Every structure is written in structure tokens, then in C-alpha cells.
Amino acid sequence: MLALSRKKNEALVINNNVEITILDIKGDQVKLGITAPKEVPVYRKEVYLQIQESNKDALNSENLEALKNLF
């Protein structure tokens, strides 16, 4: 993990096409602005983990067996 210090209105650039800007700092909260191409998905980590879990559950469901039986 790379740890960087940034101040309000300073930014980071990732892979030449994603920019993360520090918009505001209040107490222990930091507000970030993210500029990225539309084809680059950006999720909060807890949402990303929920999506992964849902996809995993869908693969393990009985519906997969029913789909296999169609073919």
C-alpha cells in the first residue's frame, strides 16, 4: 500500500486517467472527488464487497443447475 499525504484541493493521478481530489476535510472525514472515464467502475469498498458476494451467491444457487438442464 502506498500512503500519501494530501491537503485540501490537492490531487492524485492514477494510471494517467483517474484523478482523485481532496475536496474537504472535516474532523475525521475526508470528502473525495473522483474523475475517471465512464468505463472505469468506482465503488465504495463496502458496496464492492456486497456486489462480489451477490455474484458469488448467484453462481452457487440452484438456478445454475436449472440453467445447465436447459442445455
Image: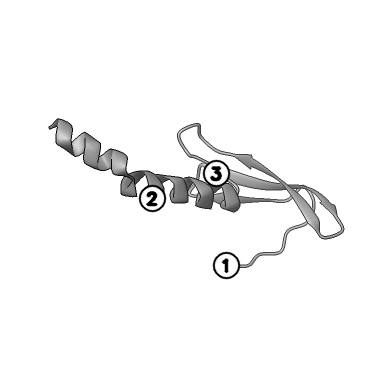
State the SS at label 2.
helix
Quadrant holding the N terminus: bottom right
Q: Is residue 32 above or below residue 37?
A: below
Q: Residue 18 — which label? A: 3
Q: Residue at image x 79%, y 55%?
A: 29
Badge 2 crowding class, 10 Å Cα cut-off, few under 14, some 14 to 19, many 20 or more, is: few
Where is residue 17 shown, x and y percent of the image? 51, 42
Q: Residue 60 — which label? A: none
Q: Disc 2 or 3, which lies upstream in sequence? A: 3
Q: Which is nearer the eye, 45 or 4?
A: 45
Where is residue 18 shown, x and y percent of the image? 55, 44
Where is residue 9 shown, x and y percent of the image? 77, 47
Badge 3 crowding class, 10 Å Cα cut-off, few under 14, some 14 to 19, many 20 or more, is: some
Circle 1 or circle 2, nearest the eye: 2
Circle 2 or circle 3, nearest the eye: 2
Q: Amino acid at mark 3?
A: Val
Q: Residue at image x 46%, y 51%?
A: 53
Q: Amino acid at mark 2?
A: Lys
Q: Residue at image x 16%, y 36%?
A: 69
Q: Amino acid at mark 1?
A: Leu
Q: Residue at image x 50%, y 31%?
A: 38
Q: Disc 1 or 2, which lies upstream in sequence? A: 1
Badge 1 crowding class, 10 Å Cα cut-off, few under 14, some 14 to 19, many 20 or more, is: few
Residue on which disc 1 sits = 2
CA gap between label 2 and label 3 equals 28 Å
Q: Which is nearer the eye, 60 or 18?
A: 60
Q: Is residue 61 above or below residue 71?
A: below
Report whether 52 appears left or right of 42: left
